[in-house]
Structures are given as C-alpha cells and as structure tokens.
C-alpha cells in the first residue's frame, strides 16, 4: 500500500506547476510527511503518558495540529469536508500561518537538541512550492493514509524514502550530491565497525545515508539493553548540513529509520575555525562522502591550516582534527588526491600520513557514482599513529558500473573479507610508506605487477593494440638479450 501511495504522490506533484523535478517531489513530500510523522509521534507519547497516569503536553498548539488543519475527521473517522480547508483557503493557511508558526520554534526552543528546534530548523528556509491548493489537498489526503506507528511500517517507509533519494540522485541537476550508493556505505560502515558507546559523525550529512546505515549496523550488532538503545537514539549520531533541502531529507531519513530526534545541525561545517575544535567536540568515528570540486570563499579557507579551494580537502582536514585519538574514519574522496602534485594535495597527504595510520585505500572504478566522471577512493584511517604501510585494494568488475548496473555488496565482499588480514592478491597490494618520494608522498594507485594499459577501456581497439605491441616489444627485448 505504501508503495502505491508514494507513486500517487509523485503523480500529483508532477501535475503541479510549482514542482518540476525529483528534487521538488522529495522536498514537498518530506515536509508533509514530517508533519504527519509528528502527529503520530505525539499521539504515541500522549497514549503512553495516559497509561502511566501522566499528562502529555503536545508540541504544536491545537490550531496547527495535523488533525485540525490537515485532516479534520467526522465521528466515523472520515475526512470532514465541511471543515477541511481546500483550494486557495488551504494554500493561504499553509503559506500565511502554518509555515511562519513552525519557523518560530527555532527561536523559542530551549536548545538545539530538542525536537522543537528541529521543527523550526526544517521550516526556517523551506517553503510550500505547490501552487494549487487542490493539489496540496490531494497530497495531504494521500500522506494521511501512511502510518508511522509500528517498526514494520517505519521500515517499509524508510526503504521507499531511500528509493526516492536514489531517484533524485539519478535525476540530474544537483541531485547526485545527495546520494551515495547504499552498498558502498554499508561496506564502509562494516569495515570501520562503530561500536555501542561510540560517537559517530558526518560533517557533510546530505541525505544522512552514512548515519542511517551506521544506526542499522549498530542496532543489530547485539541484543541492546534499554540504556544502550537510548544512547543509540540520542547520544550516538551527529551531523552537519549546509543546504536546506539536504537538511530536511537527512532529518526525515533518520526519523524513518527510527531515530526520533536526529542530532543534525543546519550549518556550514567549513565555516567553523578548525583550530577551535576542542576535546569535548571530538568523535570516535567519522563516516562521510564530502562534496568535491566546489570552491569555498577566501574567508572559509582561512579556517584551515592548508588553504585550498577544494571542498573535499577542507573537509578531510576537519575530519582528521575532530577525531579522538584512536578514532576511525571512512571517507570517500577523488582518486586524484593520492597522486596530485599541487601544494595543497602534497601538504594534506603529509598530514594524513603523519597524524593517522592510513590503514587501507579502496580504489573504485568509474560508474560507481553515476553522476560524476571522476574516479573515487575510500580512505580508511585511524588517528594518533603515523602510517608505516598502507593496503590498497582495487575493485574490479566484469561489467562497467552505471545506472543500469549499480554496485552491490556482492561486488565488495572480497574487499570486506580480505580487509582484516590485508591479504595481497592480483588486485590488492601493500605500500611501504618509507619508500615513497619524500617530497611528494605520492601514493601509487596501480598494482606493482599490473599491465600499464589495464585502465584503458576494455572495449577499446587502442588498448588491444597497445597490449599486443607491449608483448611484441617484450619478445624482441628477450631475443636481443639472448644474442648478447
């Protein structure tokens, strides 16, 4: 039923003049979903309080409760069309009263850790894009069919919501920056292996895929006590996100995965001075796919010891700084970071190799991220020790990755299996850091025994010709050697 409802929601949004893409569909679905979730959440809290003989004070006043403005019901539980707003009246109420009311919670909330603050933060910069009040009525009626009461319902909706995020990532525009393939995230989480009691952080949270998957991994890692579950809910996962759309998607995604009041702050992580990070701010685990290729302003660059316009490089400095000693990181970054000879790349490699133990580098082929031609790697490191050796694993697949052939956990299983013992194979090798060029510390991304033309497209006639030429040259050199 939920799948049909989500599909019908997109159909309604597609017909409205104010929504033009998958990004708009998920944004508008998200704020309505959030208010429906909030109503179910408060109903559960109210029922629980009554059972204990207590009184529960709802966050939203009655006028702005879902059951008042969105879906007033008759005695038999059906929509009361006599009192329900629709058309222009509904749009005027949402734009002129509801949104300003919800925004006000950002100022009135006691602190940033509360659900009240999250409400204000979500609606602070968000706006209703639906131009037709009749379309808005259709959306509200469809969302009201959804239920957030049981874990099974939340799980089904979280899967459907993830699909919407994936579709948004495949839709073009800026959607790709919000989506990291979930099989890759699950693999990174498995390898970094966050434990109950760890503080897990993503400073470029996007759709919160890393935090959601870390939550699922830790929640199912053992039989949790009530205290451990409470810790997992409230004092484990932390994130920061700069963009308004990503912020609400991230919050909603975490809620659907079972985290009731996500600790995500709507802020520009890079706007904070890296030198100001103190011990109380540090975390045990960093999991992230920071945006790359962006250009930060000069005043932002001044917050970092290594000044660069490359966004991902600034994030990597931040992640190294915010980790506790013995803290672990799993970070996606462009593969050019390993070999580039510009001053910032060299300085950052030196920092990474001297302040952390770079335990492993997973080299990913093109197509894993369907909306970028760049090749990427995943850095796995532990803070507090310098690097002596690093294990490299180059992922290979029989077919090219892309939208129609996405990466799966099966593709990554060999990497996960070999990671604990760092076994060297045809596609993995160990690098002695002391043997690198001391001036550049350029890290090799090619297997020492690899064919020099292996990275050329397998379907290319040029590659085949070069391979044949290489073989003929080798034979010729052997003949020459034999005659000397």
Image (cartoon, rainbow, N blue to C red):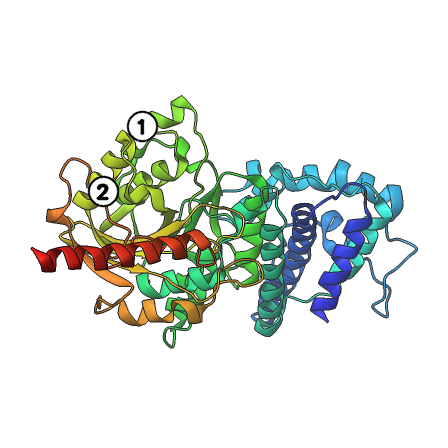
- The C terminus, quarter of image: bottom left
Can I make out residue 196 in this image?
Answer: no
| Residue at which label 2 appears | 442
The answer to whether residue 481 of the structure is visible from this angle is yes
Mark 2 surroundings: few (<14), some (14-19) or many (≥20) residues within 10 A: some
Residue 136: percent from left, percent from top: 80, 49
Image spot of residue 363 (x, y percent):
34, 55
- Cα gap from disc 2 to disc 1, whole angstroms: 19 Å
Between 406 and 11, the one nearer to me in the picture: 406
Q: In percent of the image, x 36 and y 27: which residue is there?
A: 301
**Label total for image:** 2
- Please rate how many residues cluster around mark 1, counting C-alpha atoms within 10 Å: few if below 14, some from 14 to 19, many from 20: some
**Element on which disc 2 rests:** loop
> Comparing marks 2 and 1, which lies closer to the viewer?
2
Q: Is 85 drawn above or below residue 277 in the view shown?
A: below
What's the residue at 35%, 66% (across, down)? 190
Q: In which quarter of the image is residue 224?
A: bottom left
Disc number for residue 307: 1
On screen, residue 130 above or below 237: above
Which of the marked residues, 2 or 1, is nearer the chain's N terminus? 1
Quadrant of res 233: bottom left
């Amino acid at each position: 039923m939920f799948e049909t409802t989500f599909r019908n929601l997109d159909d309604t949004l597609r017909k409205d003049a104010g929504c033009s893409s998958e990004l708009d569909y998920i944004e508008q679905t998200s704020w309505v979903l959030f208010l429906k979730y909030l109503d179910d959440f408060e109903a559960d809290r109210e029922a629980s309080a009554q059972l204990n003989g207590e009184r529960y004070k709802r966050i939203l006043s009655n006028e702005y409760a879902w059951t008042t403005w969105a879906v007033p019901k008759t005695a038999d539980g059906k929509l009361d069309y006599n009192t329900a707003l629709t058309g222009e009246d509904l749009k005027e109420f949402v734009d002129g009263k509801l949104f300003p009311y919800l925004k006000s919670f950002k100022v009135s909330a006691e602190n940033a850790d509360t659900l009240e603050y999250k409400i204000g933060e979500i609606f602070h910069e968000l706006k209703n894009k639906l131009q037709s009040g009749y379309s808005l009525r259709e959306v509200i009626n469809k969302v009201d069919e959804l239920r957030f009461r049981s874990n099974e319902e939340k799980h089904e909706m979280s899967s459907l919501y993830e699909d919407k995020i994936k579709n948004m990532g495949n839709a073009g525009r800026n959607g790709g920056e919000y989506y990291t393939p979930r099989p890759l995230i699950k693999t990174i989480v498995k390898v970094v292996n966050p434990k109950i009691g760890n503080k897990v952080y993503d400073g470029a949270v996007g759709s919160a895929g890393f935090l959601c998957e870390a939550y699922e991994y830790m929640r199912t890692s053992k039989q949790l006590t009530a205290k451990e579950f409470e810790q997992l809910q409230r004092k484990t996962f932390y994130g920061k996100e700069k963009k308004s759309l990503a912020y609400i998607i991230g919050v909603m995604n975490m809620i659907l995965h079972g985290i009731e009041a996500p600790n995500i702050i709507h802020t520009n992580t890079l706007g904070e001075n890296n030198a100001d990070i103190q011990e109380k701010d540090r975390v045990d685990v960093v999991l992230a796919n920071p945006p790359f290729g962006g250009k930060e302003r000069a005043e932002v660059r001044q917050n970092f010891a290594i000044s660069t316009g490359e966004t991902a490089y600034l994030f990597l400095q931040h992640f190294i700084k915010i980790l506790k000693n013995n803290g672990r990181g799993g970070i996606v970054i462009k593969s050019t970071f390993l070999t580039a000879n510009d001053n910032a790349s060299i300085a950052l490699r030196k920092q990474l190799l001297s302040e952390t133990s770079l335990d492993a580098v997973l080299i990913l082929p093109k197509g894993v991220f369907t909306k970028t031609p760049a090749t990427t790697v995943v850095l796995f490191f532990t803070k507090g020790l310098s690097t002596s050796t690093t294990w490299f694993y180059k992922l290979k697949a029989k077919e090219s990755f892309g939208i129609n052939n996405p990466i799966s956990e099966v593709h990554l299983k060999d990497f996960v299996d070999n990671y604990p013992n760092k076994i060297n194979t045809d596609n993995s090798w160990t690098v002695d850091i002391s043997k690198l060029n001391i001036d550049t510390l350029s890290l090799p991304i090619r297997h020492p025994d690899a064919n020099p033309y292996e990275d050329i497209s397998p379907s290319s006639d040029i590659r085949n010709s070069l391979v044949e030429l290489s073989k003929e040259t080798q034979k010729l050199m052997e003949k020459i050697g034999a005659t000397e």
